[in-house]
Image (cartoon, grey):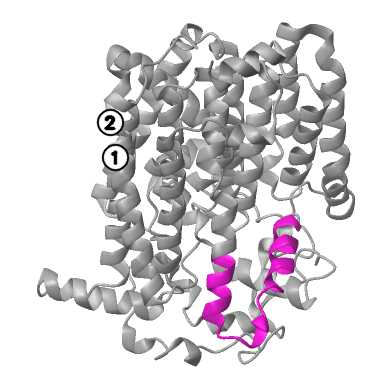
Amino acid sequence: MTAVVQREAVTGLTAAEEPFRLRHLVRHVPAFVWLVAALHLLVMVVNVGFWAPNRGPDEFRHVGLIAGVATGAAVPWPDPGTFTTTQGVSAGLLDPALAQGKTLYKADKAPRTRADWPSYVEKGGDAAGTRPNQLVQHPPTYYYLMGGALHLLPHWAERPYIDVYLFLRLLNVLLIAPLALLVFAGARRLLGDGPAARAAAALVLAIPQVGRNGASVENDNLLVLLLAALTVLTVYVLTGDTSRRTSLGVGVLGALALLTKGLALFLPLYLVLVYACAWRRSGRQVLPGALLALAVAGLGSGWWWLRNMAVFGVIQPEGNQIVQNGLGAPQTSFAATGWQFAQHFLRRMSYRFWMDAHIWDPPRWVEYVDGLLSLALLVGLVAGLVTAYRWSRLGPLRALVLLVPAGCQLGIVIVGAWHGWVSTLFPAGQQGRYLYGGLFGLLVVSCAGFARLLGRRATVLPLLVLVAGLLVTLVQFALGFRIYYTPAHHTSYLHDMAEGSRNLLAWSPLPATPFWIACAATALTALAALVSARPGRTPRPTGA
């Protein structure tokens, strides 16, 4: 008798009916999924060393605000417009204005050794700089967490600043490391332990920007972790888990997410829809759990947003304005530039969702690849919705509910981007990464659709997804390597590779030996995952 059958005999519940327990994240997980999770972790470690300091979106501002929390300069939390990026962050040496890309980082411009890097204190410490730090517009949870953890690095303010970057980036890697396991846990509850659930876990690798962001210092990483974990719990609620323990977990995670970033403001609507859908299955017994989840999430975080309304007159203030005057008078209308806005928006959302070397104007072929990936995802989502009725625990209604987070975040981004465009004619805030809070629904529903489109050949789906993920990850690394590190004038590929590697390692937060070890471990783990993904080793989909 297997462990699963024994458990069902004792509890009277099938695996699909059990209330959530933390052990579900690691119990009976296939070797393929463990390898995918390990591969994702290693890819992020390589990203830590691959990208020079200040290469992540607003990374120097995130690091500066974390440093301000650690020193007490940003405690209590500053009001909008009252905190500048401190002088100490200039120890990162690279001008963040170069984030528009096409910049060559030369080894002879870097410190000769790690010990030669300036420290936070040497560059001015908490003294006010010239750049406003608009990130104080966000709730402080991520920054308090990172600022507190920074004290674990002895004498961090006097250490070479490259060590601070390495430490904070590795902490962010730990935040995103469970993502593949979380996706699989929720997907297995809905789709069974077959190719679709395994492919959903592997599809994380097919979005290289997730790994690249996870290796950068930014508050999105905490938000992605919290929303992924919350979505897994809501999958259990949707499939019959009406326990108060699960609802309490939903409420706590929801409150923390709402105290991390405004992109979580859709959560009250999402939770209402989740419990309304659960009511259709379980009736009134969901009501205590629903009230508990909504009360904990609302009372735990609502005070922050109500304070914004009372003090600043807006839900989400502009972080660089003491008096909230908005972005200025409208300079255009939808009739005049709406089509131009839509074109910019679609291009940039697609590009910054899949592969983002943090360059302003990517090569056209990169946009084509991103466009094809977006089209493939859309096909999977449509197929998943159309065929959702063929999965007994997914169903069309649950599939739609799971897509609400991504849809709401897209709506928030559209509203914010249009507001900025009308006032400035500048395509700000058009970031595909802002949809990662809804990643679970996108991955699970699309892989459910792909599995049904492939039919009897669905056993190859995990392998196909893994191969696609490895290819686009290599493309992103190659793109970044060519733009930032190789010589501007091509001589020979061998010379370009050698010179580019020298430049990369000179600016890398990760020392050379660990970096190459991480690269080798990534290659070996990828090979093991490919072997594990062979169709003969993956069960066919059931009618789960």
Residue 114, above or below 366: below
Mark 2 touches mark 1? (CB < 8 Å): yes
Is 79 included in the stretch rendered in magenta? no
Which amino acid lies under the numbered mark 1 shown in the image of this protein?
Leu
Q: Is residue 541 visible?
A: yes
Q: Residue at x 70, y 46 (%)?
A: 262
Examine the rendered structure and indicate whether residue 431 appears above or below residue 137. Answer: above
Magenta region: which residues?
140-169
Quadrant, the N terminus? top right
Amino acid type of the residue tagged 2 in the rendering: Arg
Q: Is residue 154 above or below residue 248?
A: below
| Kind of element beneath mark 2 | loop
Q: Locate residue 13 relative to residue 5 in the image: left or right.
A: right
Q: Which residue is painted at 72% across and 7% down in the image?
A: 280
Occupied quadrant, residue 339: top left
Query: Which of 269 and 253 lies nearest the eye of the viewer?
Result: 253
User: Which residue is painted at 50% across and 55% down in the image?
Assistant: 213
- Residue 395, image x and y in percent? 55, 11
Please tell me which residue lies in front, 292 or 56: 292
Residue where numbered disc 1 is placed: 530
| Disc 2: which residue | 534
Q: Does the rendering let one see residue 104? A: no
Residue 543 appears left or right of 282: left
User: Relative to the observer, which residue lies in front, 37 or 470?
Assistant: 37
Identify the residue at image location x=55%, y=50%.
Answer: 176
Q: 505 or 415, which is in the foreground? A: 505
The dot on residue 95 is: none
